[in-house]
Image (cartoon, rainbow, N blue to C red):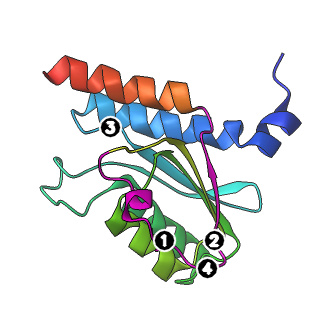
Amino acid sequence: MIDLATELYTGEYFMKEALIEAEKAFDAGEIPVGAVIVWKNRVVGRAHNLTETLNDPTAHAEIQAITAATNTTGGKYLTECTLYVTLEPCVMCAGACFWAQLGAIVYGADDEKRGYSLTGQSILHPKTRVIKGVMKEKCAGLLKSFFKKIR
C-alpha cells in the first residue's frame, strides 16, 4: 500500500511524475530527462527533453518546465516552487533555475559529466535548497537503458 504522506515528504511522489515525463522523452528518442515544478503540492509545470524534436539545444526538460510553470503561475519568479528533475541540472539549466529563483531543486541521478556541481561553485540562487538522490537508481537506470539502446 502506498503511503502518500511519506511519498510527498520524501519527494518520491513528484519524482515519479518527473519519471513519467522522462519515459515520454525515452519513447520519443530524446535523452530521457523529465521535470515537474510543484507549487503548494500541485504540479504547475511539466516537461521532458525536446532537443531533438525541436532541433533546439536549449530545449532541456528543466527550461521547458520553467516556462510552463511561469505561464501557469503568471510570474517569472518561482520562489515558492520546487523543481523535481530526474537528472542533476546542467550549467545552463542551473542558470535558468537561478533566474527563476526556484525555492528548491530535487533531483534523482547525478550527472557526472555535465552536472552543475562539477563547476565547484554555487551557481544556483543563494536561497535555493537542493536535495539530491531521490529515486536515484530508477532515474539512472532509465538513462543507462537509453544509452545502451542507441549504442
Task: Tell me where residue 35 appears, x and y as whole percent.
Answer: 48, 50
Residue type, mark 3 in image: Ala
Residue at 27% across, 39% down: 31
Q: Dot 4 corresponds to which residue?
A: 126
Q: Name the secondary structure under disc 2.
A: loop
Mark 2 vs 4: CB contact within 8 A: yes
User: Gap in Å between the C-alphas at discs 4 and 3?
Assistant: 31 Å
Q: Which mark is residue 22?
A: none
Picture quadrant where residue 9 is located: top right
Residue at 41% across, 37% down: 22
Foreground residue, 126 or 14?
126
36 is higher (above) or lower (below) than 25 = below
Quadrant, the N terminus: top right
Residues packed near mark 4 inside 10 Å, few (<14), some (14 to 19) or many (20 plus): few
- Magenta part, dominant SS: loop
Residue type, mark 1 in image: Cys
Mark 4 vs 3: CB contact within 8 A: no
The magenta-colored residue range is 113-135
Foreground residue, 122 or 96?
122
Mark 3 vs 2: CB contact within 8 A: no
Q: Dot 1 corresponds to which residue?
A: 97
- In the visual, does 135 lie left or right of 67? right
Q: Dot 3 corresponds to which residue?
A: 25
